[in-house]
């Protein structure tokens, strides 16, 4: 069964509890890696200036603590495999909807 490594776990720990619950459920059946949770000012401005984020500090949901955003990718990570990212996104959204209906999480994921 897939599971998060130490680095992914540390990144996920910076996120809102609902995101943690969703991705703890997702990783049981879909191997993925946590790329980013909370971003401090320096990290957010680097992401913004490099075009990886559309908003500067402190306007990203990554800038809250706990983070209300998380960046995730399918494992093994292949930035050119768009299909794998789409499949993961669908799996995540279905899992999040199910957990919301079950009352496990309180926020709708988008």
Image (cartoon, rainbow, N blue to C red):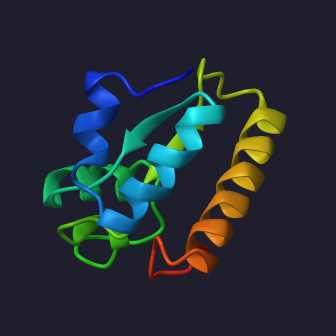
Residue 110: quarter of image? bottom right
- Which residue is at 53% across, 47% downward? 25
Whether residue 101 is visible to the viewer of this picture, yes or no, is yes
Of residues 102 and 105, the one drawn nearer to the viewer in this rendering: 102
Residues 31 and 59: in front is 31
Residue 3: image quadrant is top left
Residue located at (15% from left, 61% from top) = 41
Which residue does the image show at 65% across and 33% down from the upper left? 30
Q: Is residue 8 above or below residue 96?
A: above
In the displayed structure, would residue 98 be above or below residue 71? below
User: x, y percentage for residue 58?
Assistant: 23, 75
Q: How many marks?
A: 0
In the image, farthest residue toward the right: 83
Q: Is residue 70 left or right of residue 25?
A: left
- Is 62 situated left or right of 81 in this image? left
Decide which of 55, 84 is in the foreground and name it. 84
Is residue 69 visible to us here?
no
Q: Residue at x 29, y 59 (%)?
A: 15
Q: Picture coordinates of residue 26 (x, y %)?
A: 58, 44
| Residue 1 spot, x, y in % from top left | 57, 20
Report x, y in % for residue 103: 51, 78
């Amino acid at each position: 069964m897939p599971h998060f490594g130490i680095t992914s776990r540390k990144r996920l720990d910076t996120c809102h509890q609902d995101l943690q619950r969703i991705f703890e459920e997702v990783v049981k059946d879909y191997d993925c890696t946590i790329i980013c949770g909370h971003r401090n000012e320096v990290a957010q401005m680097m992401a913004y200036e490099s075009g990886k984020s559309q908003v500067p500090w402190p306007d990203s949901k990554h800038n809250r603590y706990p983070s209300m955003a998380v960046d995730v990718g399918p494992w093994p990570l292949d930035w050119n495999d768009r299909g794998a990212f789409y499949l993961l996104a669908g799996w995540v959204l279905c899992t999040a909807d199910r957990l919301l209906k079950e009352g496990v999480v309180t926020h709708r994921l988008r």
